[in-house]
Amino acid sequence: MDTKIWDQPVTLEMYGHGHYRIVTSAKEAAKVLRNEWPLRNGIFYERAVRTCKSVLQDAAQPEQSRLQFLQAAREADIKIVSC
């Protein structure tokens, strides 16, 4: 079992109204941040990237990456549908 999976997935509305992205782990969050994120220069974006990397290196807990990912979504003005 992948221990880096979050207890609760995060659903974001991205790419326009009615288009959703469900993120379930630090690995997936890192991929979304790297490849799909609209704002890549914010302080919370940078923290989320670092925290996801730390989780993948077993240096942080998955929940920390989830919380930083949510902060980055707020910073980028991405609608959080569920968390």
Image: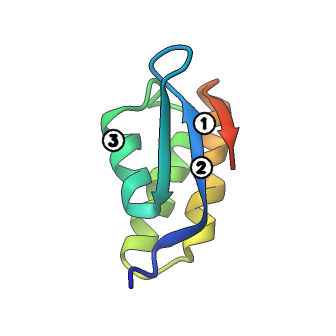
Density class for disc 1 (Cα within 10 Å; few <14, some 14-19, many ≥20) is: many
Give the class, few, some or many, for how many residues have Cα within 10 Å of label 3's Cα (few <14, many ≥20).
Answer: few
Q: Residue at x 45, y 74 (%)?
A: 4
x and y percentages locating residue 54 in the rendered image: 44, 70
Mark-to-mark CA distance, 1 and 3: 13 Å
Which residue is located at x 50 percent, y 31 percent? 20
Q: Secondary structure at mark 2?
A: strand
How far from the left and from the top, in percent, is residue 75?
A: 65, 31
Residue 10 is tagged as 2
Asked whether the residues under the numbered discs 1 and 3 touch, taking CB atoms below 8 Å apart as contact, a structural biologist would say: no
Q: Residue at x 49, y 58 (%)?
A: 24
Q: Which residue is mark 1?
A: 73
Q: Hey, what amino acid is under mark 1?
A: Ala
Dot 3 amino acid type: Arg
Amino acid carrying mark 2 in the image: Val
- Residue 63 appears left or right of 5: right
Report whether 59 appears left or right of 79: left
Residue 43 seen: no
Q: Is residue 79 left or right of residue 4?
A: right
Q: Circle 3 sits on which residue?
A: 34
Are the residues tagged 2 and 1 within 8 Å (C-beta)? yes
- Report if residue 6 is visible in the image: yes
For this orientation, the residue located farthest to the top is 16
Q: Nearer the viewer, residue 5 or 48?
A: 5
Identify the mark nearer the N-term, 3 or 2. 2
Marks 3 and 2, Cα distance to the nearest angstrom? 17 Å
For the residue carrying disc 2, how many other residues have a C-alpha within 10 Å: few (<14), some (14-19), or many (20+)?
many
Image quadrant assignment for residue 27: bottom left
Q: Is residue 43 above or below residue 53?
A: above
Circle 3 — which element?
A: helix
x and y percentages locating residue 69 in the rendered image = 57, 49
